Image (cartoon, rainbow, N blue to C red):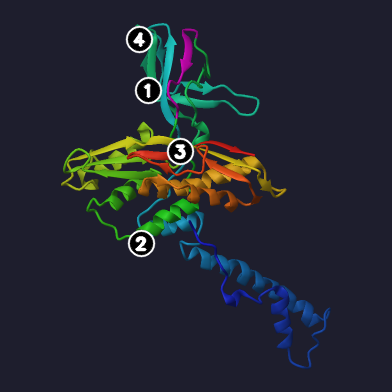
């Protein structure tokens, strides 16, 4: 996470009034410096412009000079110095099952939808390839969300309609959840990757830190390295996306291709001595939270507190998987860390004040958050 910028001492005492007062003190003794006089009014605009330059433009120039404080395209430039690029938003993807008259052709790019509700618009998904309904009256086809971002991550059995209905198609569903949609990489997350590059000398030896770095460069949110899982020269990567959800097939393929580069061995990162790389999705370990007696400031609501808590707890998950245990005392303070939370009574993890043990390949996932 990026640091909070503190302006240097020389920026102090640089308000328009401070600067203008110093200008008036430097006038010759025989020049009128009273308010409303010509010298006074003539020099005030210059004082305002100088203050603006110091307090705004000079401060921003200092901030963008260091990745700890830079943002957006300026942080992207710092990433380029260590051969890193910011991850764009990703589209969710998955499989849908179509039922209808045998032989019905469905073109690539056909749109299927989650119906709109009173509060949300319809979510659209496009077929990746042409398909034909088989003799059993069904066909499965891969789809990708039309829009980028996590809003298109949906539960199973929620896609139910077509954008343009076809009489020969009688039903549509997604047997499994559609996942993998992520937001554009945030400044904080991108800075963390940049900081890791500066902190760790780049190697291609195939150390655990190398595999974790490569997986994140390919778009993974986190990675568990299982070395020699199937004998010498084998490595298994257990992956989650940037939402903390198990990686879908698209992300698994991206990570594998990025490290192995089967189409171009000159770009291969996988050490030659490594005979086999396997990428698998993490097994979710749902963790439920209960917090009662919340005392909140007037400008914050419980849904906002839950959203902020879910974001903070992801950082704890990353550390927990390294030790194989999610500690109650690491999570409880996060509630107080949310802006607007003044106090609370009870906080429970999976119904108690307990630590959660994580088995190999398990990754914690936020389940229900019952905050009241």
Gap in angstroms between the C-alphas marked 3 and 4: 38 Å
Task: Please provide the residue range marked out in magenta.
Answer: 167-178
Q: Nearer the viewer, mark 1 or mark 3?
A: 3
Proximity of marks 2 and 1: CB atoms separated by less than 8 Å = no
Residue position for label 3: 365
Q: Earlier in the sequence, mark 2 or mark 4?
A: 4
> Hey, which quadrant is residue 201 in on the image?
bottom left
> Could you tell me how far apart the alpha carbons at marks 1 and 3 are, in whole angstroms?
32 Å
Query: Is disc 4 surrounded by few (<14), some (14 to 19) or many (20+) residues within 10 Å?
Result: some
Of badges 2 and 3, the one in the foreground is 3
Q: Earlier in the sequence, mark 1 or mark 3?
A: 1
Q: Nearer the viewer, mark 2 or mark 4?
A: 2
**Cβ–Cβ under 8 Å for marks 3 and 4:** no
Comes first in the chain, label 2 or label 3: 2
Q: Would residue 331 appear left or right of 43 to someone viewing this image?
A: left
* Residue 199's disc number: 2
Quadrant into which the C terminus falls:
top right
Which tag is nearer the camera, tag 4 or tag 1? 4
Q: Nearer the viewer, mark 2 or mark 1?
A: 2
User: Is 256 situated left or right of 89 in this image?
Assistant: left
Query: Which callout, 3 or 4, points to the residue nearer the camera?
Result: 3
CA separation in Å, label 2 and label 3:
28 Å
Can residue 175 be spotted in the picture? Answer: yes
x%, y% of residue 73?
49, 55
Q: Which residue is mark 4?
A: 134
Secondary structure of residue under mark 3: strand
């Amino acid at each position: 996470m990026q640091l909070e910028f503190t302006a240097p001492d020389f920026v102090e005492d640089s308000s328009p009034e401070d600067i203008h007062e110093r200008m008036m003190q430097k006038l010759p003794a025989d020049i009128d410096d009273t308010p409303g006089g010509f010298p006074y009014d003539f020099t005030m605009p210059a004082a305002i412009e100088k203050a603006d330059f110091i307090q705004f433009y000079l401060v921003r120039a200092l901030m963008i000079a260091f990745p700890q404080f830079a943002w957006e395209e300026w942080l992207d430039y710092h990433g380029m110095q260590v051969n890193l690029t910011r991850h764009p938003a990703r589209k969710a993807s998955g499989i849908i099952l179509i039922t209808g008259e045998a032989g019905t052709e469905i073109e690539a790019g056909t749109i299927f939808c989650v119906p709109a509700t009173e509060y949300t618009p319809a979510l659209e998904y496009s077929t990746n390839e042409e398909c034909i309904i088989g003799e059993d009256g069904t066909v499965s086809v891969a789809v990708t969300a039309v829009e980028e971002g996590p809003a298109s991550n949906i539960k199973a059995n929620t896609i139910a309609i077509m954008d343009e209905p076809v009489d020969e198609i009688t039903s549509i569903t997604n047997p499994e959840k559609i996942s993998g949609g992520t937001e554009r990489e945030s400044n904080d997350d991108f800075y963390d990757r940049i900081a890791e590059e500066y902190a760790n000398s780049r190697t291609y030896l195939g150390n655990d830190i190398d595999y974790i770095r490569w997986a994140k460069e390919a778009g993974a949110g986190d990675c568990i390295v299982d070395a020699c899982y199937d004998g010498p020269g084998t490595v298994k990567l257990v992956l989650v996306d940037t939402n903390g959800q198990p990686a879908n097939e698209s992300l698994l393929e991206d990570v594998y291709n990025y490290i192995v580069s089967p189409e171009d061995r000159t770009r291969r990162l996988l050490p030659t001595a490594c005979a086999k790389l396997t990428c698998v999705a993490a097994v979710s370990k749902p963790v439920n939270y209960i917090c009662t007696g919340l005392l909140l400031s007037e400008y914050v609501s419980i849904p906002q507190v839950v959203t902020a808590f879910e974001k903070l707890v992801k950082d704890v998950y990353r550390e927990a998987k390294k030790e194989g245990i999610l500690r109650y005392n690491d999570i409880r303070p996060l509630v107080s860390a949310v802006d607007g939370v003044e106090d609370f009574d009870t906080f429970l993890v999976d119904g108690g004040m307990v630590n959660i043990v994580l088995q190999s390949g398990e990754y914690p996932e936020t389940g229900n958050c019952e905050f009241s």
